[in-house]
Image (spheres, rainbow, N blue to C red):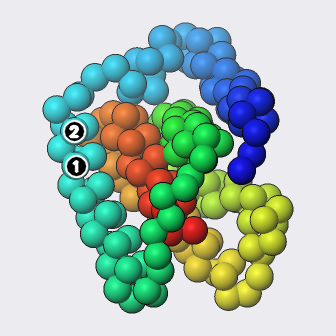
Amino acid sequence: MEPVPRAITSATIKIVIWVIPVILLVIIMEKSKPFSYLLLHHNFRKSLKWTGWVSLALILFYFVINLIVLNNNIDFQIGFNGWLNTILLVGITEEIVFRGFLLRKLMDSFRFWIAKTVTALLFVSIHFPIWFYKGLFEFPYILSSILTVFVLGIIFGFVYKKSNSLWSVIIIHSLYNLLVLLFY
């Protein structure tokens, strides 16, 4: 288990490197309020509907695959760092950058499916250092990881567009990370 000060440091770095630059870009380049631009302030009912349905599908799929097909056990010992950084902050920071800013910006110039695909590929690319660092960059694991993250990026982009809210994607992303930690 990681010590609490290290988890806090990691959380601070995520916010400084990921969130603050996006907020500054929105303010300076887009001349817009970050909460409005990133779709963090409205569409609560529509967002809740999409969050509920996609979350239910994700939970059912993940439990069937892990408990029935792979016969994995659930490990509820996540720890402070897992809760703070992997579940809470990764969903917020990555979604602010990838769906809230990049996807939104790419949709200004490209059709949605192109913008969504490019964003999903970029989303995959940021996971390479994590896989390498954790020693998970091995065949065939890496292929399934790349495919999983790419499909999640596509789903997150779709939900973002349909719900017109970043909160739905943040919640679904955080839920997915929780499921990964429970079966890791």
- Give the residue type at disc 2: Leu
Q: Secondary structure at mark 1?
A: helix
Residue that appears at 38% across and 71% down: 62
Q: Is residue 87 left or right of residue 167?
A: right
Secondary structure beneath dot 2 equals helix
- Residues 32 and 176: in front is 176
- Residue 46 vertical placement versus 176 (above, below): above
Q: Is residue 107 visible in the rendered structure shown here?
A: no
Q: CA distance from mark 2 to mark 1?
A: 6 Å
**Amino acid at dot 1:** Gly
Report crowding for label 2: few under 14, some 14 to 19, many 20 or more residues within 10 A (C-alpha): some
To which residue does mark 1 refer?
52
Q: Position of residue 147 (x, y in %)?
A: 55, 74
Q: Quadrant of residue 74?
A: bottom left
Image-based side of 161 in relation to 13, left or right: left
Image quadrant in which the C terminus is located = bottom right
